[in-house]
Image (cartoon, grey):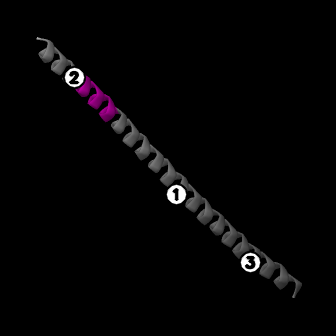
Amino acid sequence: MNAWIGIIGTVIGTFLGGGLAWLNSKFQMRSQTEKDRKKLMLQKMEEIHELLSDYKHSYKMLTAEMLKEVCLRGIG
């Protein structure tokens, strides 16, 4: 009977350890997925910011150029 207790304890310990390892890996995967999602969102927001900054700069340059032309036509 004592031999069976050791075997049963070993089997239960194995299943318990395996279950805990599975839960741990599941939570790590969920955490990693969330980190990856946040990183992707940040990259996309940076791209949008860069595009809007380029657009703003181009708009300012075009406006300045048009004002310059209007002023030169008005003088000449």
User: Is 60 situated left or right of 37 in this image?
Assistant: left
Give the image location of residue 42, x and y in percent: 47, 46
From the image, tell me which residue sits under label 2: 67
Residue at image point 56% right, 60% down: 29
Residue at image point 48% right, 54% down: 37
Up-down: is 49 above or below 35? above
User: Is 72 situated left or right of 23 in this image?
Assistant: left
From the image, tell me which residue sits under label 3: 11
Q: Secondary structure at mark 1?
A: helix
Disc 1 residue type? Thr
Quadrant in the picture for residue 59 = top left
Q: Secondary structure at mark 3?
A: helix
Spatial separation of the CA atoms under disc 2 and disc 3: 84 Å
> Which numbered disc flags the more N-terminal residue, 2 or 1?
1
Q: Quadrant of the N terminus?
A: bottom right
Spatial separation of the CA atoms under disc 3 and disc 1: 33 Å
Disc 3 residue type? Val
- Please state the total of marks drawn on the protein image: 3
> Which numbered disc flags the more N-terminal residue, 3 or 1?
3
Up-down: is 34 above or below 15? above
* Mark 1: few/some/many CA within 10 Å (<14, 14-19, 20+): few
Q: Secondary structure at mark 2?
A: helix
From the image, tell me which residue sits under label 1: 33
| Residue 53 or residue 40, whichever sits in front | 53
Which one is in front in this view, the residue at disc 3 or the one at disc 1? 1
Which one is in front in this view, the residue at disc 2 or the one at disc 3? 2
Q: Does 39 lie within the magenta span?
A: no
User: Is 11 situated left or right of 5 in this image?
Assistant: left
* Mark 2: few/some/many CA within 10 Å (<14, 14-19, 20+): few
Which one is in front in this view, the residue at disc 2 or the one at disc 1? 2
Please state the extent of the stretch shown in magenta in the rendering. 54-65
> Which numbered disc flags the more N-terminal residue, 2 or 3?
3
